[in-house]
Image: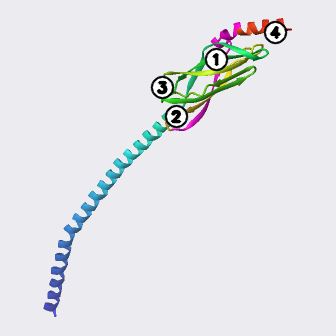
Amino acid sequence: MSAEREVIDLDEHIHQPAESGSATPDRRRARRWMRVRLVAAFVAGVVIGGVGVSELRDSREERQRTASVSLVAFPASGGGGGSDVKGVLQMDGQLAVINAGPAPITVRAATGQGPGVLVRDTGQSRQVRPGGTGWIDVKLRLECSIAFGSEPLSMRFSVETGDRQIREVSYPVALVGSVWQRGAELPCAHLREMEKRGG
């Protein structure tokens, strides 16, 4: 009985250590390999995610830069003209538009209306680079008695940005003391003189 027990005990001892001894290194290797793969996948995810976020941020900044519009406008020239209505002068002029934004723009239209003043572009688009100036040809309709009494004149611009979107932008244009007022002085004085003679 005791010998039989010893054989069984030995048999158990022989099989168990052999199984656990041969399985343990394989499991350890598998675990190590799994850890290496997980760390590699994590690092790759961080790198790819970082690149993706950076590209997304750059793309968003580029879209914002392309879409932003900032401009400055002022009367650049004006003079001559005539009248077909009593006390109203029609005059040709130019409006200088400075692109103060970070991207090129195309000015598609320019209009302004105030007491005694109507300004309209002649239908020609102007592309203006950042920091550059575009010259917009305009037609002015001025009521000599009140045209330069209030200021500034709110000019509205239809602007196409680099993303091919049309945006409406307003800018207050000073009329008092401008070349438009100086260009209108003599013709308006002539119109007033003619009215006196006619009256």
Label 1 vs label 2, nearer the camera: 1
Structural distance between the alpha carbons of marks 2 and 3: 12 Å
Label 4 secondary element: helix
Structural distance between the alpha carbons of marks 4 and 1: 22 Å
Structural distance between the alpha carbons of marks 3 and 4: 47 Å
Quadrant placement of the N terminus: bottom left
Magenta range is: 164-186
- Give the labeled residue for mark 4: 195
Disc 4 vs disc 1: Cβ atoms closer than 8 Å? Answer: no
Colour setup of the view:
rainbow
Label 2 secondary element: loop
Query: Which is nearer the N-term, disc 2 or disc 3?
Result: 3
> Which residue appears at 19% of the width and 83% of the height?
12
Q: Quadrant of residue 121?
A: top right
Disc 3 vs disc 1: Cβ atoms closer than 8 Å? Answer: no
Which is nearer the eye, 81 or 159?
81
> Which residue appears at 65% of the width and 13% of the height?
180
Q: Furthest residue to the bottom? A: 1
Label 3 vs label 1, nearer the camera: 1
Query: Which is nearer the N-term, disc 2 or disc 4?
Result: 2
Structural distance between the alpha carbons of marks 1 and 2: 28 Å
Q: Amino acid at mark 4?
A: Glu
Q: Amino acid at mark 3?
A: Pro
Query: Which is nearer the N-term, disc 4 or disc 1?
Result: 1
- Give the labeled residue for mark 2: 161
Which numbered marker is on residue 130?
Answer: 3
Query: Which is nearer the N-term, disc 3 or disc 4?
Result: 3
Which numbered marker is on residue 92?
Answer: 1
Residue 43's x, y, as percent? 32, 51
Q: Amino acid at mark 1?
A: Asp
